[in-house]
Image (cartoon, grey):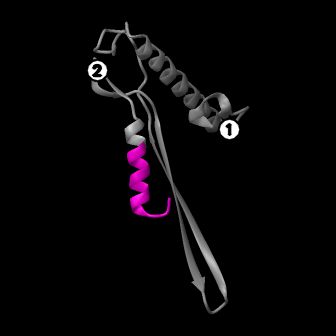
Amino acid sequence: VHTPDEVMEAISRGEQRRVVAPMKMNPRSSRGHAICVLQVCETTPDTQRGLTSKRLSKLVLVDLAGSENSKRSYAVEGASGKPERRVEAKHINQSLLALGTVIERLGSRGGHVPYRDSKLTM
């Protein structure tokens, strides 16, 4: 995207795909993660030297779904009895665990960093 309007359109498309469900601890619980990467490139011409300089900046916005404990934060529409909510909770917890492992390995600067264990860390 190249304009503020295109950014807002992309965010709107993401919002339309966002899944929320009422849970005991949160009436609008996000059932997935959202990642938005904004990369800005500033180009400045240097007419005296006939060069152009570029400055790149990147802003990563991440909204993670919370860890799920089905006994405490069960789905309002039928406790944890809804199979799709249990599957969602399982995927949320797996991806958060994978992210935590990647962050821990990066922080310890040792060993293999398992980026490919989750779509969230790829």
Residue bearing the label numbered 2: 25
Q: Quadrant of the C terminus?
A: top right
Of residues 8 and 35, the one nearer the viewer is 8
Residue 103 seen: no
Residue bearing the label numbered 1: 109
In the rendered structure, which amino acid carries the disc numbered 2?
Met
- Magenta residue span: 1-13
Residue 37: horizontal and vertical position, in percent? 51, 50
Residue 96: horizontal and vertical position, in percent? 51, 27
Q: Looking at the image, which residue is at 40% across and 15% down?
A: 69
Question: Callout 2 environment at 10 Å: few (<14), some (14 to 19), or many (20+)?
Answer: few
Tell me if 97 is positioned left or right of 21 in this view.
Answer: right
Q: Looking at the image, which residue is at 61% across and 29% down?
A: 118
- In the rendered image, the vertical position of residue 103 relative to residue 70, given as above or below: below
Of residues 15 and 65, the one nearer the viewer is 15
For the residues labelled 2 and 1, the Cα–Cα distance comes to: 36 Å
In the rendered structure, which amino acid carries the disc numbered 1?
Arg
Tell me if 89 is positioned left or right of 98 in this view.
Answer: left
Of residues 99 and 9, the one nearer the viewer is 9
Q: Looking at the image, which residue is at 41% across and 27% down?
A: 31
Tell me if 91 is positioned left or right of 50 in this view.
Answer: left
Q: Quadrant of residue 25?
A: top left
